[in-house]
Amino acid sequence: HTSTMTSHGDGSTMKYGGNAFGRNVTQKQMPAGVACEQLEDFNAKPFANSSPPVVNALISAKGLTSVYEEWKRDVLKQQGVLGSFSLPKVAAVVDTFQSQFETKGVKLFLCNVRASTGPQTGQGVQFVYWFEFVDITQQPAYIPDEIYDSSRNPCCSCTVA
């Protein structure tokens, strides 16, 4: 998989925004000790069925495989019948599991952005969600700039459950 807005990537980079021609794409390279995993509304299969290699390596090295799998199942339960996720509920799942991750040396963050898709696509907006897994020994003070903020949710998320 390549790291695009429609696939997981390897867990080292998040790409979002831009137009159909690949212009104006924002790319966030994760620092050492940080891995990412995308959560897509209406396309949960990549999240449900696989995990990025960089995430797997960190989770495995920290002995968090069973906690991670249970956390992932609980995140997937926050998807509505039409396929969108309730982000406040996903944030609550992150909060619930935070201490289990931190006990093993990993901080977990839910991130979100509103990204412009550019003039060639009618100045649309894309809502992008992902998780960042932070190895506390390598990045003790790291907090992502895009940490979850409900003001960046789509205005219709409560009605597309």
Image: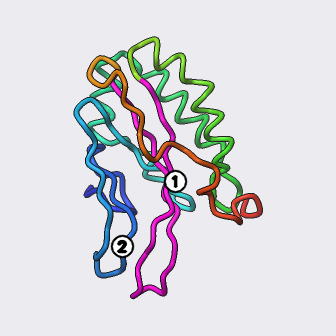
Occupied quadrant, residue 5 = bottom left
Quadrant of the image for the C terminus? bottom right
Which-is-in-front pick, marks 1 and 2? 2
* Residue ID at (32%, 32%): 56
The secondary structure type at the circle numbered 1 is loop
Q: Amino acid at mark 1?
A: Ala
Q: Nearer the viewer, residue 25 or 35?
A: 25
Q: Is 113 left or right of 132, judged from the image as shown?
A: right
- Residue 18 got which mark? 2
Q: Is 104 left or right of 79, judged from the image as shown?
A: left
Counting residues from the N terminus, which is met first, the one under dot 1 or under dot 2? 2
Please state the horizontal and vertical placement of residue 42, each as a whole percent of the image. 57, 62
Which residue, given by chain and number where applicable, does mark 1 sit on? 44
Which class describes the residues within 10 Å of circle 2: few (<14), some (14-19), or many (20+)?
many
The secondary structure type at the circle numbered 2 is loop
The rendered magenta stretch, by its main secondary structure, is classed as strand
Q: Nearer the viewer, residue 54 or 14?
A: 14
